[in-house]
Amino acid sequence: MRKVIAVVAVVVVIGALTFFIFGQRGPREIILEAWEFGYNGTTGGPTIKLKAGEEIRITLINRGGVAHEIIVVKDQDREAFLTETHKLVRRFIEKGVTDPIVIHASPEWHVSYRIFAVTEMVIGGNIVLGFRTIDHIHVERGQVFSFTMKLDKPGTYNYVCGLTELTFPETHADRGMYGTIIVEA
Ligand SMILES: [Cu+2]
């Protein structure tokens, strides 16, 4: 009888472990490390490929000396997004505002981001100015942030860091912090 109980116990434990290891697999993990100025040590970060509707979990580890971020935009919106960001930076410089924290916290900055944020993103389902968007992922230096996302529409997207340092007019994306996301049907 004891033997039977022992065998049953072993089977239950193995079953539980199998379920724990294989049964609860979450979204595919993608890890990006950011520093000045690239993702994973390259100008133009790794290309992320996923299936339409597939959920992935992206972790941004900021190993740099300044804040970095991930903003997902449609491929065709990337230039417009960065041009808009440049205009904003120039406006802030003209106004004499030089504190990046003040700038990034300003409604003007955030509205600009949200206009160009991707519309098929399913995170929280924020509706801003008629678009379904996500907030951009902003990670201070030395910090780590993860988020899950899924893109339902096949196509090419970009992820960029839209931050600037005010000591130069370009964004981090202009200096190499960008990558491609390919969503396959
Ligand atoms: Cu950056």
Image (spheres, rainbow, N blue to C red):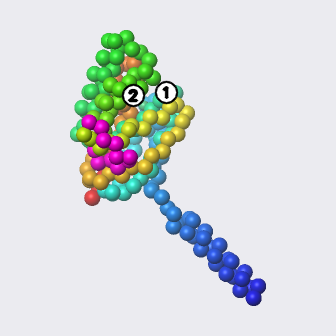
* Kind of residue sitting beneath label 2: Leu
For label 1, the residue is 66
Residue 120 on the magenta span: yes
Tag 2's secondary structure? Answer: loop
Residue beneath the point at 36% across and 57% down: 54
Q: Which residues are magenta?
A: 118-129
Q: Please give the count of numbered marks on the rendered protein.
A: 2
Front one among 40 and 132:
132
Front one among 177 and 140:
140
Magenta stretch, main secondary structure, is loop
Residue beneath the point at 39% across and 28% down: 163
Earlier sequence position, callout 1 versus callout 2: 1
Is 174 rendered above or below residue 51? above
For label 2, the residue is 163
Front one among 142 and 16:
16
For the residue with label 2, is its CB less than 8 Å from the closest atom of ligand 1?
A: yes
| Coordinates of residue 141 in the picture (x, y in percent) | 52, 31
Q: Quadrant of the N terminus?
A: bottom right
Residue beneath the point at 54% across and 36% down: 143
Residues at badges 1 and 2 in contact (C-beta under 8 Å)?
yes
Residue 9 on the magenta span: no
